[in-house]
Image: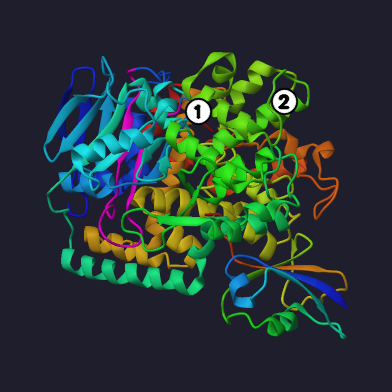
Amino acid sequence: MTGWTGNILRINLSSRSYKKETYDEAFAQKWVGGRGFSMKILWDELKPGTDPLGPDNKLIVSLGPIAGVPAPNTGKTVVAARSPLTGGYADGNLGSHVTSQLRKAGYDIVIFEGIFDKPGYVYIEDDKVTFFSAQEVWGKGTYATLDWLYAKYGRGAGILTIGQGGENKALFSVVRSLEGRAGGRPGIGAVMGSKLLKAIVVKGTKEIPMANPDEYKKLGATDLKKVGALDKESGWSKQGTDGILAWCNEVAALPVRNMRETHHKNAWMLDGERVDAARVATYGCPNCTMRCGITVLDKEGHESELDYENIGMLGSNLDIWDLAQVASLNYLCDEYGLDTISSGSVLGFYADAIDRGAIKGDFRWGDAERAKELMRLISHRDGEIGNLLADGTRKMAQQIGQNSGRYAMHVKGLEISAYNCKYIPGMALAFGVAPIGGHHKESWVISFELKQTSRDSYGREKAQKVIDLQRIRGGLFEFIVSCRFPWVELGWPLENYAIYFNKATGLNWALDDFWKVADRIYALMNGFWLREYPNWDRSMHYPPMCWFDPSNADKEGPIAGKILELAKYEKLLDEYHDIRGYDNRGIPTKRTFQALGLSEEMKQLEKYAALK
Amino acid sequence: MKILVKMIGPFIYDAGFNEKDFEFSNPLSVEELLSELHLKQGRPKIIVRNGHGIGLKDQIADGDRIVIAPIYSGG
C-alpha cells in the first residue's frame, strides 16, 4: 500500500498512554481518508447514546492520501467526533501544518480517547508521544495559546488548539490553527475541551509514502504555480470569498436580521471592495497559492481574518454595518474558539426573540458592543444568558418556547450558513439534507438555480444537482482532504484530483470511483443519525419553517411576496431520496446499503431501527 | 432606454465601475450590452435582472437593474 501510511495513532488521555495500530488496503480503498476514515471509526467504536461530552466520545484527526503533499491545495486536516450540538456525526476541516507534520510523523489518523485528569496538551514527534500540562494557558484564548506553543515548537509545528469556548463546552466551539483557521463547527472544540485537551502539537521527519514521489512532487509544484496564475488572472483573491456578498444582496440571499430580510441598502459597507480596501495582510493555508484570508484591523486594532460567512453572519445578520466592528466580533470568535457562523446565528436569534417579545433582554439589532460582551458570556458560559446562548439556536428555542423554533435558523441543530433561502428551493434542499446539519460545504446550488434553471422551480434536476455537488464537495474534497477552492472558484478541473490520487497511491481510479465512496460515506452518516435517533423522520431534512411562512416573505425587493412552498419542497425532497436510494425518511434502503458495500453496517443498524 | 448596470467582484476592475447608469436609444439584448462593456472575453458570467437569472438573448427593458457577476460557487 502506498499513498497511505497505513498507521493509526491511538492516544488514551485517561491513562496517558498510546499505541500504534495499522489499517489495511481494503479499509483505505473503501473509506479513502479524512471524513471517510472518521465516519467509519466513529461508527465502529462509539456505542449509540455515547455522551458527546463524556470520556467515551472519540476525537478523530484524520488525513487523506494527498494531504500534506504539495499540490493544490492540500494543507487541510479533518477533525471529527459525535457532535454535542447536533447529536449526529460531525466534522470540519481546517488549514494547518498538522497535515504535513502528522503524515511525516507516519500517521493518517489519530484517535483521542478518554479524558485528562487536568488540562494538558499532547506532543507527537514521530513515534513518540508526550503528555504535558496546559495549566499555564488553560483559560486563555487561542492567540495566546498559539504564541505559547510557537515559542516552544516553532511556527512550522502542526498545532490545533481551543479557546475558552471549547474549555467551557460552548456547543458551537471549534478547533483553531494558524492565524485565523478554524474547523469543526458542530462543537468539535467542545469535545476537545471536555477531554481537558487544550492543544495537539505534531512534528514529523519521515518521508510521506507515495507511489511516484518524484513525478508527484514535480506535478504538484507545477500545478500550484498554475493555480496561482489562474487566481491572479481571474482577480478572485482581490475580494476573496467576500466578493459574493454584493451578489447575495442583489439576488436576495443575504442574511439580514436573523434572515428576516434578504437584502439591505447598507450591504455595500461590507462588500468585497470595502474588505479589500481595508486589507492589512493576507494569510492562507499551507500548500496554497490562492490565499483567501483577507485580514483587516478590527475596532480595537487586532488583525482579523475575514471571509464572507463571517461577515454575513456577524454583520448583516445582526444589522451591524461597520466593517471594523464586524472584524471585532470575528476576532473574538477566533480568540474564544467559537464558530463564526453559529455565533452570528445565535446572536441573531437572540435579538429576534427579544424583538418579538419571546424573551426579555437588552440586545438589540446593530448593537456591536453588546454583541462583544455576549461573545464573552457565551465562551465562558457566564450566567444565565451565557449558558442559554452557548447551547446554540435549537436548544435556545426549546428553552425560550413561544413558538420561537420557527425562526431558529438551523438544520438538525447546526446553524445555517450565510445564505438566506426563503426563495431558493434547491439551496434550501441542500441545507435540509446536509448530513452534518445546515452547512454550505456539502452542496451549494444557487448559481445553478438562477442560471441553468428557473429560480422558482422544484424540479428533479435540482435534487440531482444537490447530489452531484454533495459527491464533490461533501465527498471528494472531504475524504481526499483537500481544499475545494481551486475547483470552486477557479474551475481547476476535478480530473486533476484523480491524477494526484493515482500518482500518490499507484491506483487507477476514475471520478466515478470517488462518487461511490462519497455515496457510501453519506449513507453511513445517515445511518449514524438513525442509530442515535431511531424515531428519525423526514422532518429532519427540512429547513427552518419560517422559510415556508407567507408572513415571512419580503415586503419589497426582487422576491417581494415570494416564499418557499412546503408541498413542493416535500416533492423535491422525495426526488432527492429517490435518486439517492433512500426511503421516505431519508434513510438508505437495504438495497442501497448493500450496493454501497455496507451490508455489515446495515445488519448492525437493524438492531436499533427498522430499514426498508 | 435607461438601465443601471452593477458589476460584482472581479468584473468591477474589468469594467472600471461598480455600478453605472446607461442610456441606449435602441432596444438591446444582454449579449449586446455585454459587448458594450468591454469585459474580458471568455470568463463565465451569471447575469441577473431584478433578482432572477436571464440569458444572453433576453431583451433588456427600460428601468432594468442588470447585475453581472462571475459564477459564484458558494465558497
Disc 2 chain ID? A
Amino acid type indicated by mark 1: Leu
Q: Is residue A555 above or below residue A362?
A: below
- In what element is the residue under mark 2? helix
Can residue A23 be seen in the rendering of this structure? no
Q: Is residue A536 above or below residue A526?
A: above
Task: Determine which residue is flagged by label 2.
Answer: A353
Percent x, y of residue A556: 85, 50
Question: Is the residue marked by circle 1 packed among few (<14), some (14-19), or many (20+) residues within 10 Å?
Answer: many
Pointer 2 with pointer 1, Cβ within 8 A: no
**Which residue is pictured at 12% across the width and 50% down the height?**
A206
Question: Is the residue marked by circle 2 packed among few (<14), some (14-19), or many (20+) residues within 10 Å?
Answer: many
Task: Determine which residue is flagged by label 1.
Answer: A530
- Is A490 included in the stretch rendered in magenta? no
- Is A74 included in the stretch rendered in magenta? yes
Percent x, y of residue A228: 39, 69
**Which residue is pictured at 59% across the width and 42% down the height?**
A325
Quarter-of-image position of residue A153: top left
Mark drawn on residue A511: none
Q: Is residue A607 above or below residue A547?
A: above
Say whether residue A217 is left or right of residue A409: left
Pick the front one: A566 or A595: A566
